[in-house]
Amino acid sequence: MTETINCPFCDPLERVIKSNHTAQVLLSDPRKVPGHILVMPKRHVLAPWDLTQQELQDIFELIFFVEKKIIGKLGDGCDIRQNYRPFMKQNALKIDHVHFHVIPRSYQDYIYSVAEKYETDLFAELDDLERDEVTKLLAD
Ligand SMILES: [Zn+2]
């Protein structure tokens, strides 16, 4: 749980552009679009549910701060995204230290044009069986 070997987010040095008590903001490098920002705990945490209440509060304080700063400047809106993919080994594009992506977005922007416009086919009607199965899963 506290494995910190080769973690670029545990020792970010000059990459930190803003921080508070338990969380920090870095520019994503590599990044998808200009202004692609990462918000994370200072502590090495692998799973988002292992964040403390203080870390969650500090992380979302910084996420919303960043969002308000970039909307209208780097995009007309914003995506907040957290990927939990323990089935993948850490690499340059996948860092195990939990982090949230804050990505400026605009209507039919670069991300849409190269990727998301192909994702619309993924949407399917929710059927009753699936609704019942997932609802039952979350009920316990
Ligand atoms: Zn780390």
Image (tube, helix red, strand yellow):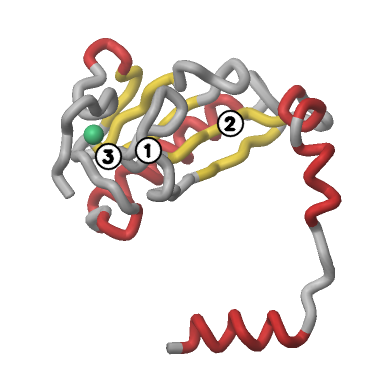
Other residues around mark 1 within 10 Å, as few (<14) / some (14–19) / many (≥20): few
Q: Quadrant of ligand 1?
A: top left
Looking at numbered disc 2 in the image, what kind of residue is underneath it? Answer: Ile
Q: Distance from label 2 to label 3 (Cα)?
A: 18 Å
Q: Distance from label 1 to label 2 (Cα)?
A: 23 Å
Which residue is identified by label 1?
89
Which residue is identified by label 2?
103
Q: Residue at x 79, y 54 (%)?
A: 122
Q: Residue at x 39, y 34 (%)?
A: 39
Looking at numbered disc 3 in the image, what kind of residue is underneath it? Answer: Pro
Residue 23 left/right relative to 66? left
Residue 129 left/right relative to 39? right
Q: Residue at x 14, y 44 (%)?
A: 2
Q: Nearer the viewer, mark 1 or mark 2?
A: 1
Name the quadrant containing residue 6: top left
Which residue is identified by label 3?
41
**Callout 1: SS:** loop
**Callout 2: SS:** strand
Q: Residue at x 43, y 19 (%)?
A: 27
Nearer-N-terminus badge (2/3): 3
Nearer-N-terminus badge (3/1): 3
Other residues around mark 2 within 10 Å, as few (<14) / some (14–19) / many (≥20): many
